Image (cartoon, rainbow, N blue to C red):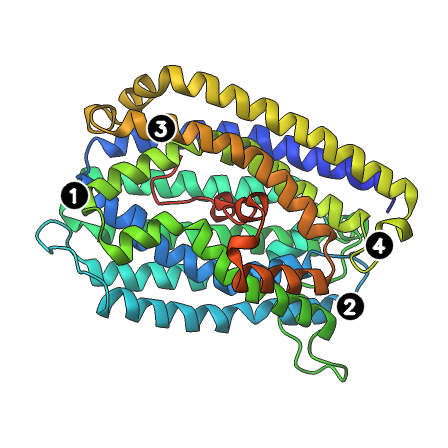
Amino acid sequence: MGSQEVLGQAARLASSGLLLQVLFRVITFVLNAFILRFLSKEIVGVVNVRLTLLYSTTTFLAREAFRRACLSGSTQRDWSQTLNLLWLTVPLGVFWSLFLGWVWLQLLEVPDPDVVPHYGTGVVLFGLSAVVELLGEPFWVLAQAHMFVKLKVIAESLSVILRSILTAFLVLWLPLWGLYIFSLAQLFYTSVLVLCYVIYFTKLLSSPESTKQHTLPVSRITDLLPDFTRNRDFVNWKEAKLTWSFFKQSFLKQILTEGERYVMTFLNVLNFGDQGVYDIVNNLGSLVARLIFQPIEESFYIFFAKVLEREKDATLQRQEDFAVAAMVLESLLKLALLAGLTITVFGFAYSQLALDIYGGAMLSSGSGPVLLRTYCLYVLLLAINGVTECFTFAAMSKEEVDRSSAAEYAHPELCPNLCKFQHTHFWRHLPSSSLST
């Protein structure tokens, strides 16, 4: 596949993702604004900070390295080995879910059961929902590698909307259920998300015409399951080593990505009510970043990974592909800078109004507007961060990934600021909380 064709597919993926996310996020925005008027700040704090941190940490540590390694390079590979490698995310997710669940139940402060009931059940179900989502990882990677433009956006947006509807219904009719409401809604969300991918591939592979059109490396839905009967190696060891390189880096990246939530969770610097207000403002401030920058980054990471070869120096790359990649990078940086400046200017002027419309006096009074204005400046930095990160990690060789990881662990004070910001890439965890917009 030529670089121009890959660029066209990446552009369609980004634009389609942007338009669909705007449509679905508007619906979710309205639903969440309605839900917030029936909840206490303490409930919001425990769900959006404590339990969501458990879920995002489990999924990130279990799958992020696998995604980056398996999306690199050409689609012409032994996909049975790649799929076998991806299924390892499930037992890894079970391990992290059990370990982190024990930490959340035994080592952290337990909320007052009269204010936040059913905390233990919430921890168990949020951990279970992370494992359920990992069951769809092979489907997700196969879809991304073959650039199925609408599947990812529709599956995630539909799941979020259905979760919001279920949450609104339970909050209105069964308010005494407490964390049962959000735990069941989260489990429902991940189940619907995985089912969307399974149903799509089942229908696609049952149609010979569609299979030929997409040139998929599998012919039956059972080909996506682990293959223990093969005579060759169970996994591609080159991909496995690259996965390990990214995995070593993922610990530091997760800490930097979710740093404020770890501080609030483990150091108790804010009570649960203040945590709830902070997280709502955080989600609202990052809304445009999730709508615009996240689809662009995910789509063009695939573009750069396909056009550039990891193990080759710039002078050894195909010059036509290299020129296209440089042109695309320059254009993306200009677009990100323009969008970030626009958000910063208008965000300062209308922060208080936006919070009052979204959550009422609970958000618009106190420190909420100041937090949102500060976040607008942060979005400007994130605009540049996302584009530079997707290019950097798509072009790095395995050795460069190892050196980058080692340098940041051993001497973080020597790393350039841009490299540090390249790890604060929070929108990979879409949706960022149970009440995110």
**Residue that label 4 marks:** 313
**Residue that label 3 marks:** 372
- Mark 3 or 2, which is nearer the eye? 3
Q: Helix, strand, or loop for circle 1?
A: helix
Cα gap from disc 1 to disc 4, whole angstroms: 60 Å
Marked residue nearer the N-terminal end (3 or 2) = 2
Spot occupied by residue 212 in the image (x, y as percentages of width and height): 81, 51
Q: Helix, strand, or loop for circle 2?
A: loop
**Residue that label 2 marks:** 78
Q: Amino acid at mark 1?
A: Pro
- Are the residues flagged by discs 1 and 2 in contact, CB closer than 8 Å? no
At 47% from the left and 48% from the top, the residue drawn is 429
In the depicted view, which residue is nearer to us: 249 or 64?
249
The reply, left or right, for residue 294 in relation to residue 128 is right
Marked residue nearer the N-terminal end (1 or 4) = 1
**Residue that label 1 marks:** 175
Cα gap from disc 2 to disc 4, whole angstroms: 25 Å
In the depicted view, which residue is nearer to us: 358 or 222?
358
Residue 207 appears in the rendering: yes
The reply, left or right, for residue 164 in relation to residue 20 is left
At 20% from the left and 27% from the top, the residue drawn is 366
- Mark 3 or 1, which is nearer the eye? 3
On residue 431, the disc is none
